[in-house]
């Protein structure tokens, strides 16, 4: 997902009886489905987990601009160019309010960016794959935004108020993006030429498995997952969300006339769900660990933008300070 | 009341086609340049702003090129014009095709253009050609915001640190020779000015010069001396840069002819 494998600092789950009164009151508040707000008391682990998750989510939005922005200059019609520009602009906007949500927990945007740039903070594995053709832009809308929505819809009910409210807005825009992505694939697959359909099939072949990996490895006995669920940061297991995604997406691929690149994919009547093949978790860990096709490129692009832009940010700051000094001088003169 | 002097005159569709093509190509080419910054701008707020301005410019390009295609009457549409013409058929100003350079150059280019574009659109909103007036009225609102933003940034960075000042001054020097073309009238401009379809460029030159002069002073930047004004874009004689830009922009359309997008 946009936030994968978030550590909570927990070694095991505490029962209510084991908690100090303050923590117990917090947990009961969460259990009752109430929101935690920035000024409320919260366990240190809850705060740190949220900072990790929200900043990773924000970083994903920011790095996620890059693979799509790669095609703005080559979008095949003016309409598609406008749609793609608007979409990437939305992603940057999501990043902005997610950073703001994380800032309510006592970390600055500059600190978070430093953690991204020095490799300490992660972003979603999916953005380390390249966008090689125009069909990849449609695939990102359909599959990547589709998978993101699966995860973000429950996050609207997350216990932390600022994060849950940010998700309400993000989800509306992501749904729109997903429809636009799918619509562009309908054009390629149902109205386009054979070469265009081939382009779409090739893109699906490359994006299908990475999209499934977005949900992260099975939770299994992960104490971090259990703790995140107890804190109502996380609401569903990774496998539940992945299954839901597959069930929703396979019929859409059928409608496009595209073949999902999984020989083990079949409808299971008994479960009322699709069975699907084994995910290559080695690839997932490799990409998350830094050896995906585009990890270095993506990070270098972001670091370069930040470093090359230092003079710009310093210039604006210096000007704002001059103005503030003039104002206070003016006030002193008037007094 | 007397009818305005242009009421009974008409101009050829050729001149109108050429003129609307210029307006559309300016927007399209500048949008294409700006798009390259998306995801790479010096601050997150700038990623958003630059995408926003580029998006406005694509929208305006769609409107102008659709009108141009209609005036041409050859059955082409806005996308045909954007994706099917070679550089020599583009009619944008040389200024907007200048490479991005650093962010200082991109912002300075934007300001020098906006300071012309906004009053131009305001004047065109009173055009005797209804379809031009309608598009211009809508676009002028967007251009007003573009000008406010680029003007504020030029002032802040000109009067920021030593480095930001020097970068803005260098950008100004590089771009200045391309500004004259905006207000140099050619027969197309003159034909449309006579009928009231387009403003007199001499009037616009004064507005532009005053606005730019005031901003540069506030930004503590030195206005370059006016030398020879590079020209040719409006007639289709461009810099070497445009061909590469179009090669990238038109690649998908050319590699997949007859596609549906």
Image: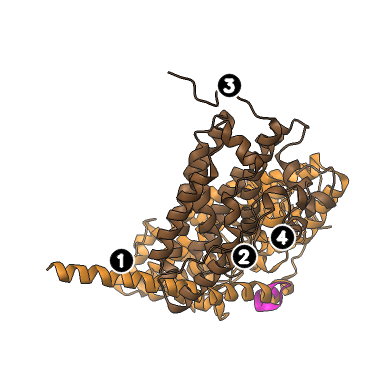
Sequence-first tag of 2 and 4: 2
Crowd around label 3: few <14 · some 14–19 · many ≥20 (10 Å): few
Above/below status of B170 relative to A101? below
Residue at mark 1: A39
Q: Who's brown, chain-wise?
A: B
Let me know if residue B7 is in the magenta part.
no
Where is residue A109 drawn, in percent x and y? 45, 71
Q: Which residues are magenta?
A: A287-294
Question: In the rendering, what colour is chain A?
Answer: orange
Sequence-first tag of 3 and 4: 3
The reply to the same-chain question for discs 3 and 4 is yes
Is there a contact, CB below 8 Å, between mark 3 and mark 2?
A: no
Quick check: A264 left or right of A303?
right
Subunit of label 4: B
- Distance CA(mark 4)–CA(mark 1): 58 Å
Residue B241 circle label? none
Is there a contact, CB below 8 Å, between mark 2 and mark 4?
A: no
- Distance CA(mark 2)–CA(mark 4): 14 Å
The reply to the same-chain question for discs 2 and 1 is no
Residue B100 circle label? 2
Q: Which quadrant of the rendered structure holds the N terminus of chain B?
A: top left
x 50%, y 58%: residue? B111
Q: In terms of secondary structure, where does tag 3 sit?
A: loop
Q: In terms of secondary structure, where does tag 1 sit?
A: loop
């Amino acid at each position: 997902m946009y936030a994968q494998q978030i550590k909570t600092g927990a070694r095991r789950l505490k029962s209510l009886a084991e908690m100090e009164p303050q923590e117990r009151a917090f947990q009961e508040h969460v259990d009752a489905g109430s929101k935690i707000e920035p000024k409320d008391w919260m366990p240190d682990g809850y705060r740190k987990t949220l900072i990790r998750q929200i900043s990773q989510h924000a970083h994903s939005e920011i790095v996620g601009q890059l693979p799509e922005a790669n095609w703005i200059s080559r979008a095949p019609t003016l309409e598609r160019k406008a749609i793609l520009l608007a979409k990437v602009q939305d992603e940057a906007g999501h990043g902005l309010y997610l950073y703001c949500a994380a800032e309510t927990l006592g970390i600055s945007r500059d600190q978070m960016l430093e953690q991204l740039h020095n490799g300490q903070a992660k972003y979603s594995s999916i953005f380390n794959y390249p966008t090689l053709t125009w069909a990849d832009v449609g695939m990102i809308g359909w599959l990547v935004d589709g998978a993101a929505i699966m995860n973000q819809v429950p996050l609207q009910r997350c216990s932390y108020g600022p994060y849950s409210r940010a998700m309400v807005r993000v989800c509306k825009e992501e749904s729109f993006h997903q429809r636009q992505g799918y619509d562009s694939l309908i054009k390629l697959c149902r109205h386009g030429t054979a070469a265009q359909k081939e382009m779409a099939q090739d893109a699906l072949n490359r994006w299908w498995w990475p999209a499934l990996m977005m949900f992260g490895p099975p939770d299994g006995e992960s104490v971090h997952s259990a703790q995140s669920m107890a804190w109502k940061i996380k609401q569903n297991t990774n496998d539940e969300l992945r299954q839901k995604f597959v069930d929703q997406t396979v019929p859409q691929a059928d409608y496009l006339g595209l073949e999902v690149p999984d020989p083990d994919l079949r409808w299971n009547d008994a479960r009322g769900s699709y069975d699907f093949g084994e995910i290559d978790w080695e690839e997932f860990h490799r990409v998350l660990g830094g050896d995906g096709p585009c990890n270095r490129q993506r990070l270098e692009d972001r670091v370069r933008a930040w470093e090359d832009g230092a003079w710009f940010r310093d210039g604006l700051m210096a000007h704002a300070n001059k103005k503030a000094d003039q104002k206070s001088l003016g006030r002193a003169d008037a007094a | 009341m007397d009818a305005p002097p242009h009421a009974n005159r008409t101009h050829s569709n050729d001149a109108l086609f050429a003129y609307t093509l210029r307006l559309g190509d300016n927007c399209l080419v500048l949008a294409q340049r700006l798009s390259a910054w998306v995801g790479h701008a010096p601050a997150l707020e700038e990623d958003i702003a630059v995408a926003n301005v580029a998006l406005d410019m694509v929208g305006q390009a769609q409107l102008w090129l659709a009108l141009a295609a209609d005036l041409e009457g050859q059955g082409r549409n806005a996308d045909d014009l954007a994706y099917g013409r070679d550089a020599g058929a583009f009619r944008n100003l040389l200024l907007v095709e200048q490479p991005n350079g650093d962010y200082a150059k991109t912002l300075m280019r934007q300001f020098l253009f906006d300071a012309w574009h906004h009053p131009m659109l305001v004047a065109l909103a009173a055009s005797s050609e209804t379809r031009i007036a309608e598009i211009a009225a809508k676009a002028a609102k967007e251009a007003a915001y573009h000008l406010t933003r680029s003007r504020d940034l030029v002032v802040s960075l000109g009067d920021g640190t030593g480095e930001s000042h020097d970068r803005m001054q260098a950008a100004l020097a590089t771009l200045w020779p391309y500004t004259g073309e905006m207000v140099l009238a050619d027969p197309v401009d003159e034909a449309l000015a006579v009928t009231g379809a387009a403003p007199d460029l001499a009037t616009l030159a004064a507005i532009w010069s005053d606005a730019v002069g005031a901003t540069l002073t506030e930004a503590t930047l030195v206005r370059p001396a006016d030398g020879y004004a590079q020209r040719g874009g409006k007639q289709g004689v461009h810099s070497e840069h445009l061909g590469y830009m179009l090669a990238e922009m038109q690649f998908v359309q050319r590699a997949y002819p007859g596609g549906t997008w």
